[in-house]
Image: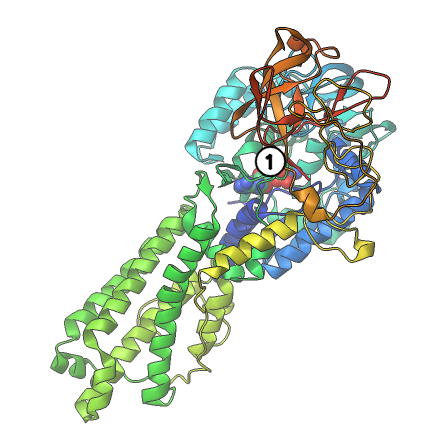
Amino acid sequence: MDNPGKFYITTPIYYVNARPHIGHTYTTVVCDAIARRQRMMGVDTFFLTGTDEHGQKIERSAAAAGCSPKEFADKVSGEFRTLWDRMKITYDDFIRTTEPRHMRGVQALFTRLQERGYIYKGSYSGQYCVSDELYVDAVGPGAPCPECGRPTETVHEENYFFKLSAMQEPLLKYYAEHADFIRPETRRNEVIAFVRGGLRDLSVSRTSFTWGIPVPGDPRHVIYVWLDALANYMTALGYGSDDPRDQEKLARYWPADVHMIGKEIVRFHCVYWPAFLIAAGLPLPRSIIAHGWLLFEESKMSKSRGNIVRSETILDTLGQDALRYFLLREIVFGQDGSFSFDALVQRFNGDLANGLGNLSSRTLSMITRYFDGEVPYPSKAASLNAGFIDHETALKSQAEKAIQQFNEKFDKFDFSGALKDLWFFIAAVDGYIAETHPWSLAEEKSPDSRAQLGTILYTAAEALRIITVLAYPMIPDATAKIWRQLGLGEIERFDLPSLTWGQLQIGTELGKVEPVFPRADKSMIERMQQMEQQRSEPTPSPEEGGKGGAPDVKKTESQPAGTGAEAGQPATEAVAGSQGSGAPVIASTGTSGTSPSTDKIAIDDFLKVEMRVGEIKVAEKVKGADKLLRMEVDIGSEVRQVVAGIAKAYDPEKLIGRKVVIVANLQPRKLRGLESNGMIVAASLDDGLPVLAGFLEDVPVGAKLK
Ligand code: MSP
């Protein structure tokens, strides 16, 4: 280490185009647990998180929400910060890429790369994935992004280029000499293979939009969002500032010890970021650690899939420790893991309420009841007499093993394994209490039985102390409460390296004993699901006092595709192939042409209509019906046959691969003997052909419209 005794850890800075969900919380909680533990080890720790606010994606999201990108970013960035505060995340700094300190630093880095000859002007003509903000080596408009599968957009622009091609050898050399730079091993191998495959120069500026940091001296260009974003790890420490305090901070903490990221952004962190740093002559981070994804309903939790769970739902019900514990215990670090409300409640009741909570309250209540709330004296003689000595010796050595194993596993980022072992130890302490049944000794009232009772309760309390302090970085709130109930003050100040059996002082006065994890009943699952549903419903604007799923941005005039010109109207059925009904939708299955009603409907009525994004896989003319097409449409969960009256407007071959809006919960109908299972949404023009509804931005198949 260049700066021994310091530890600098970062989360990715999160995009502000979507509100935080438990996927973001996962990375942040992992970093928080590591940072808290480092501080307890006496290490000078700096923990950074923040928000990534520039780029085309954010600019478009803001436009769709009818507000300026800055207003949009302020709102969502604030939500991230509020959430981290509620989650008791102990970040030392929160960087926003729209802050002057960051913008100045990015420009300084760009200038430095230019001065060192790594940036030149050229022009880019090719594909770009706006969702990943990634230049893609793909051919042709709409070619899928190799990372996310969404169609790419074609970009023809004058750009500044970074000489990434010159970095192939230096990067490979660096990876070879720093085996721990990229972890886990699988990611390291992928990165090495990617770099070995050859690197092309990278466009690092854009001219077709303005929401970004201007290129110094050429403000028609904005700096590529990933160069902008990655630099946050240094600008937050003061890179680009002349202030001696910033320079000192940068010298103290840079290079970072850990950049914690999700596996989908490995290339940016393990190829681009070190390449920029090598070119700039700056030290490289020590390690980049990529974890797996949190899945919900079997796919990666993400806004665009519409399968997210918000942390607030769990915070409002079971509390932040429940979520932290679940994420760290349930997901094997490095692998993908699933979230479900059932599993959350099961873990909460099984491990927290019945496990740690129960051990804590029974041990501390007995000390309160039988020893006036003072930690009793452990008498070896008494336990010899009672024949408990073997139990106690065994428990002590189990405690020592638990400390050692926990430390080893935590340091290898095996949080789940560390907690599993620790909970084995909780079970062992429970077993010890069950076997020695202190409550019956309490009834005997003889000096011997009292000494034995004291010994058992001391032993249990000491075991509880060790469990509590080890679990603190992962579940800080509950453990801090147990610590105070143990009469030990502020847990975060505990010196972890000194932890050994027997430090609990006899005569320590306990605090007020209260339950830390009240059991959750079955209705909790339903309650959380309902809360989630409400959160994801379309919400009124903040002016109307709304609170819910979509970022609270200004009311927008652009309605989701499919709601038609008459805002608030559900998709209306029309006769297959009929035109000129004035209905906003062309029916594939319907028989009754209807005009859009002018009556208002309640949101609940609208929500009955399930609209999904579908992709046309097969399209062909229906024999004997010149207006009808038979299609097979993938709607994520299944492929549906849909028959629609759009044959006059669309060539079947041209529809293959096209994303459309499907009303998915209509009863099937038969058209020309073919079952049609769903309806395609389209504009139906009075004097023209139907026009299929679609999206300007890419959306994944199966996404719900609401
Ligand atoms: N802004 C970029 C990162 C720039 S860092 C210089 C970005 N932002 S993001 O909002 O998309 O956040 C991605 C990160 O959030 C992931 O790498 C991961 O840390 C976390 N996660 C978001 N969804 C997640 C899951 N479903 N599962 C696990 N982690 C998730 O990419």
Q: How is the image coloured?
A: rainbow
Q: Residue 664: horizontal and vertical position, in percent?
A: 60, 32
Residue 571: which quarter of the image? top right
Does 391 sit above or below residue 585?
Answer: below
Please report the residue visible at 67 percent of the width from the left and 13 percent of the height from the top: 628
Does 187 sit above or below residue 644?
Answer: below
Residue 100: which quarter of the image? top right
Please report the residue visible at 56 percent of the width from the left and 17 percent of the height from the top: 674
Outermost residue, bottom side:
446
Does 225 sit above or below residue 161?
Answer: below
Q: What is the three-letter code of the residue carrying label 1?
A: Arg
Q: What residue does disc 1 label?
A: 305
Q: Where in the image, quadrant-wise, is ligand 1 located?
A: top right
Q: Residue 230: horizontal and vertical position, in percent?
A: 66, 36
The C terminus: image quadrant: top right
**Could one spot residue 311 in this view of the protein?**
no
On screen, residue 113 versus residue 514, left or right, reads right
**Could one spot residue 263 in this view of the protein?**
yes
Q: Secondary structure at mark 1?
A: loop
Q: Residue 352: horizontal and vertical position, in percent?
A: 41, 63
